[in-house]
Image (cartoon, rainbow, N blue to C red):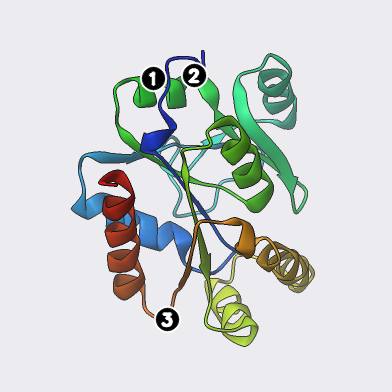
Amino acid sequence: MLENTNGRYLVVVSGPSGCGKDTIVDRLLGDNPDMSISVSYTSRSKREYEEEGKHYYFTSREDFERRRNEGLMLESVEYNGNYYGTPLPELCQKLDKKETVILVIEVTGGMTVKKMFPDALLVFIVPPSMEELEKRLRIRRTETDEELKGRLDIARHEMTFAENYDIILVNNEIMECKAELEKEILRWQNT
């Protein structure tokens, strides 16, 4: 399935929870109809504002494990007690059509993708500071204090992977970071 795909159209965006990566990518896609996102599967519960098939494909742990065991996931990870993974068939279909596909995934998945698609562009988005990250996570009000602590611990660990990415962007302001991401993708595709 991977033989015909072209990693030159694959962009991985990672960063700690709360850094703004999903919002940045949403704005990028809104301004670039020729780009699309790869919707991940997750075993976590759907948040109030999330839509099935737009934000994630929500499934049970058992179904996720079945898909992973059948080789239907490019990469997968257990993150803060829930599974997340990239569906391989859908991704390959888009890449075969030479669509620019954005994967918003965590760092372990990013490293897996880079091994399988060496031509992929890996972008790491960081918050201005850990204090700002905690503030952003608290404003979301989507986690308990214990879950928030877990996300911050994970974020500190994830930040150590930034140096493995091709580009590091600091999200001081959403639209500025989106414009920088767009510029970097276009530069990469035109080299």
Query: Is residue 89 toward the left or the right of residue 175 in the image?
Result: right
Secondary structure under the numbered disc 1 in the rendered image: helix
Say if 63 sits above or below 110 in the image. above
**Callout 2 amino acid:** Pro
The residue singled out by tag 1 in the image is 93
Q: CA distance from mark 3 to mark 1?
A: 35 Å
Secondary structure under the numbered disc 3 in the rendered image: loop
Q: Earlier in the sequence, mark 3 or mark 1?
A: 1
The residue singled out by tag 2 in the image is 89
Q: Which mark is residue 172?
A: 3
Pick the front one: 132 or 141: 132
Q: Position of residue 176 (x, y in %)?
A: 30, 74
Identity of the residue drawn at 74% across and 18% down: 69
Say if 26 sits above or below 168 in the image. above
Identity of the residue drawn at 63% across and 80% down: 134
Q: Position of residue 52 (x, y in %)?
A: 45, 37
| Marks 1 and 2 close (CB-CB < 8 Å) | yes
Q: Residue furthest front?
A: 191
Q: CA distance from mark 1 to mark 2?
A: 6 Å
Q: Earlier in the sequence, mark 2 or mark 3?
A: 2
**Callout 3 amino acid:** Asn
